[in-house]
Amino acid sequence: MTQVSETDAIVAGAGVWGCTVARTLADAGLRVLVLERRSAPGGNCRCRRDPESGAEVHVYGSHIFHTSDPKTWAFVNRFTAFNGYQHKVLARHAGRTYFMPLGLALVNAFFGKELAPAEVPAFIAAETASAGLPGTPRNFEEQAVSFVGRRIYEAFIKNYTAKQWGRDPKELDASIIRRLPVRASYDVNYFSDVLQGIPRWGYNALFDEMLSHPNIDLRTGVDFLKERPKLPAGKHVFYSGPVDELLGWRFGPLPWRTLRFELENAPVADWQGTSVVNYVDADVPYTRIHEFKHFHPEDAETMARPCTTICREYPATWKPGDEPYYPVNDAASAALLGEYRAAAAREFPDVTVGGRLGGYRYLDMDKSMTDAIATAEAFLKKLRNA
Ligand code: UDP
């Protein structure tokens, strides 16, 4: 095991970004000290097995790995096999259940039509024409209505979004809705990425395997910011904690949304017939219900057990000290982030800040991994050229 005094680089935070940086540096021969504040690595992908239902419970909300980047897929497949799970999301609206991607299955079921794919663009154009939209969408609502028209927006997007973000969608950034695919086909896969799945032996095993390298020394229960004075000087640090915390919150906290999860074991083998159902209406206080066993359909024993773990997800107002989940990206937070980034670059030239928390970004796992590989490779290149 690497001794602290022999460390070549320090990674603060063992989530997706930190573990990927650590492993890429270690593979290149560097000795890496990884410090994690929680008791185990994996960040918000961390899971726990429920003893009664046998399900792999995603304790920070459902995580499905999906990517279109072959390099990232090859990287993650070095540490785990994937089970071939393809994510589908259903949406409950006004007492009926629809396939959520904004596509032909939803449009035809919602409007009671039998449109063919070629008829969808004209149908949506007619739906949006009456909406009186400006040429370029200026916010989330205008962007969403321009994609699907006002009636689908009002039914499936407006209320869910208001619950999720605690704001009127007119005040939100248009980029958020661009995450959702809009299709003129019956493809009900939630993601457009074909490279997709759940780690066959669970997320915890994936992160344990990533960090299992003779050049990596993982210390859990260690807060980098508190330990910093005792750490060896002059070592480059890859920091994936909140950037405002790195600077002592001196300009005020960057705003987040948080989530509250309500877990329940139901005495049935199958509670909702699928892994995630969104509740898109305003009168239901939660946004979705997760049923974790469906992420592992290959696990016949768990599937058959007459017990299943479900989880209701409630978005909530965040205050300092709460778990940060979604960055609230708007003009005010962008200005604040700019101040923090400038201060970090000025005062911590030996610290690379990244990841979801460090970058203050709404970041999927694969994007975080891709970014971490590129960050570590750029650092190695600089070292070789020095
Ligand atoms: N969204 C919606 N209705 C849905 C699902 C998503 O309006 O049934 C909107 C909502 O604004 C959300 C965004 O689409 O924030 C992105 O959804 P995604 O499922 O990617 O969110 P995540 O799984 O990251 O929470």
Image (cartoon, rainbow, N blue to C red):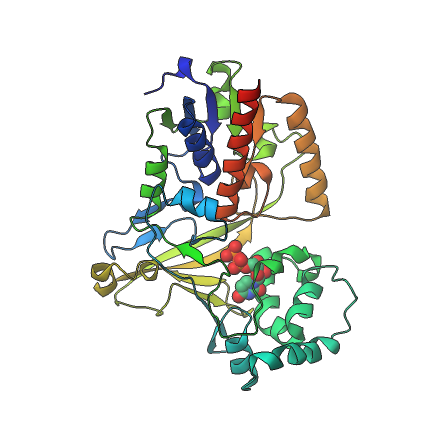
The relative height of residue 239 versus residue 357 in the rendered view (above or below) is above
Give how far across and how far down residue 353 sits, in percent. 57, 31
Asked if residue 76 can be seen in this view, the reply is: yes
> Quarter of the picture for ligand 1?
bottom right
Give how far across and how far down residue 29 sits, in percent. 41, 23
Which residue is painted at 66% across and 74% down in the image? 149
Q: How many marks?
A: 0
The relative height of residue 217 versus residue 107 in the rendered view (above or below) is above
- The residue at the far front in this view is 385
Give how far across and how far down residue 32 sits, in percent. 42, 24
Q: Is residue 302 left or right of residue 128?
A: left
For the residue pair 200 and 133, the one nearer the viewer reads as: 200
The relative height of residue 262 versus residue 212 in the rendered view (above or below) is below
Quarter of the picture containing the C terminus is: top right
The relative height of residue 380 versus residue 337 in the rendered view (above or below) is above
Asked if residue 163 can be seen in this view, the reply is: no
For the residue pair 40 and 265, the one nearer the viewer reads as: 40
Which residue is painted at 33% across and 45% down in the image? 80
For the residue pair 57 and 282, the one nearer the viewer reads as: 57
Give how far across and how far down residue 337 sits, in percent. 67, 38
- The residue at the far bottom in this view is 113
Quarter of the picture containing the N terminus is: top left
Q: Quadrant of residue 252?
A: top right
